[in-house]
Amino acid sequence: MTAVNPPAHTDAVITPVGGPTPVTNAKQLQKPSGMPVHKYRGYEAVDISDRTWPDNRITRAPRWLSTDLRDGNQALIDPMSPARKREMFDLLVRMGYKEIEVGFPSSGETDFAFVRSIIEEGAIPEDVTISVLTQAREELIERTVESLVGARRATVHLYNATAPTFRRVVFRGSKEEVKQIAVDGTRLVMEYADKILGDGTIFGYQYSPEIFTDTELDFALEVCEAVCDVWQPEEGREIILNLPATVERSTPSTHADRFEWMSRNLTRREYVCLSVHPHNDRGTAVAAAELAVMAGADRIEGCLFGQGERTGNVDLVTLGMNLFSQGVDPQIDFSQIDEIRRTSEYCNQMEVHPRHPYAGDLVYTAFSGSHQDAIKKGFDAMEADAAARGEGVTVDDLEWAVPYLPIDPKDVGRSYEAVIRVNSQSGKGGIAYVLKNDHKLDLPRRMQIEFSRIIQAKTDAEGGEVTPTQIWSTFRDEYLPSPENAWGRVQIRSGQTTTGSDGQDTITVEATVDGSDTVLTGTGNGPISAFFEALQAIGIDARLLDYTEHTMSEGASAQAASYIECAIDGKVLWGIGIDANTTRASLKAVVSAVNRATR
Ligand SMILES: CC(=O)SCCNC(=O)CCNC(=O)[C@H](O)C(C)(C)COP(=O)(O)OP(=O)(O)OC[C@H]1O[C@@H](n2cnc3c(N)ncnc32)[C@H](O)[C@@H]1OP(=O)(O)O
Ligand SMILES: CC(C)C(=O)C(=O)O
Ligand SMILES: [Mg+2]
């Protein structure tokens, strides 16, 4: 039998002659979109076939700069008020950022006053460098430097666009003229810093060829070199060259090629701090930053949760946590990620998406059955591994190995509560996890299956999520009805077992059966079989299929949980009993199953 491909761009569906299954070739079914692709062209690759970055590994944290208060702030619908700016600044300091871009002081009074306030109020720790951005225009540079008076460590960051369209459209100048803007700007920064700032300020300089991503590489290099000629970097006098993906335009790999090329070709490289500043227009800023570091970048600029112009700056939280999850200390404290998120949401007046990596509400939650099953097994295996390692070893001492959870949610201050949530996509593992985690009940596998069918019926009927509280109340009602809400034929009040010289157990149980007080007696080779015999007297034919028990806590008052699988009048059912005494627990489990059989 041969399937014949249909001509391209037709709706044809191939139906092999005589074949039972119609075959569709999805590729052949795709059609031109009709969108104006002719308006765009591919990004130019870099001639660097001997690239080395793919073999590099990131083994330590890069230098970080948070630009939440500048690039993040300039992109907000409502820029931060002074109070919100201060909250953000204090948060960044608490988290451990040592380089913080605090604003664009020449933009107006708000930013200028904010910079003054953190300097004058002593809010900047000794080891934190603040930086401020300016265009390469003299009056703006002067005002910018003025804002820094009294700062212990401060960097002026100067930018001008260098890409062809910007040369033509914005500056309406030649390459030489655009380079001159950067050169003159650098000189002016140095002159004003000399004039305005005293010796008490450790002064640094950063230059960004804006739109680096669309700038010819050799021209970007030429401008950076010209800027270095003015600043004269040397031992103890670094220059930060920040190569921004002002608009993200290429794959992260091409971006990395450009970084490797720049890193190789810069003279005075050892005195240059090469910095990457990716925006997220293609949705790949995180990868672009990581690959740029592999390609030689020393420093990353970004914002918490990817705030910033358009699609945002690169997300510093994801980058830091990516390192953490690989066993590399990000040197930033993310251990209270919800507090970081709340503060950031307050300052930016924008919500973090529930699926945001590491921080979203749902990112440590599994709804689906197979995920829940694997997660529960993962937690169980880690506990078993810790126990096997001996006294005092806990799960926290082991390498994290829970499926579907890239990190331990506890490490970022999350509880395990939300790890498993139950809806119509869930299976037994998730429900069993909730019972074990919240109520210390470790259900046997077949009982998990039985109870998950009960929950499944509920989710199918009602839709939506079943909360842990609802799971527990359904479980209690089904297997462990309280005396106040008792239902079923049999309720036991007390029981006694005696063992005869022949080894047989005789049981006497005071019970209420069908509403009447009764004493049931029976004999067997154990209390359970004796109880089964006693039940025969009231017409219940029960047979034990499986039995398991475990303690629920430690200490003298420990409760035990017994699980019993019985065949009762042709039905196979589980029951559970909880009691400090294991025999009583197992009798209660039998009653639980018996009552369910007739419910
Ligand atoms: C990619 C980035 O994120 S860059 C940072 C962007 N952030 C901001 O712009 C926020 C703060 N900015 C502001 O508040 C204002 O832009 C100000 C107050 C600084 C300046 O405002 P204005 O004086 O009105 O100028 P405006 O910003 O519109 O810039 C236009 C002029 O500056 C020139 N210019 C733009 N960027 C630069 C630069 N980096 N260096 C030198 N000149 C520049 C333009 O060519 C234009 O010149 P022209 O008037 O001769 O045509
Ligand atoms: C000012 C520069 C660094 C910038 O924010 C950008 O180019 O995105
Ligand atoms: Mg930017």
Image (tube, rainbow, N blue to C red):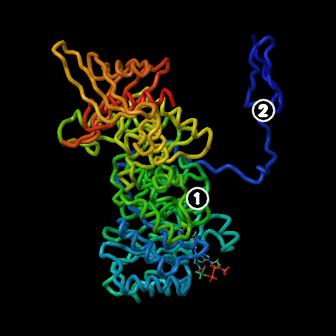
Relative image position of residue 498 (x, y in whole percent) = 20, 23
Mark 2, secondary structure of its residue: helix
| Residue at left offset 27%, top offset 36% | 551
Amino acid at the residue labelled 2: Leu
Residue 570 in the image: state x and y as whole percent: 49, 17
The residue sitting at the bottom extreme is 195
> Label 2: which residue?
29
- Observer-nearest residue: 96 or 410? 410
Quarter, ligand 1: bottom right
The label number, if any, that marks residue 213 in the structure image: 1
Please tell me whether residue 576 is drawn above or below residue 39 in the rendered image. Answer: above
Residue 187 drawn above or below residue 2: below
Position of 573 relative to 17 (above/below): below
Is 532 left or right of 113, judged from the image as shown?
left
- Residue 552 visible (yes or no): yes
Quadrant assignment for the N terminus: top right
Could you say where residue 131 lies in the image, as x and y percent from the top left?
A: 43, 75
Q: Residues within 10 Å of mark 2 (few under 14, many from 20)?
A: some
For marks 1 and 2, give the CA distance.
36 Å
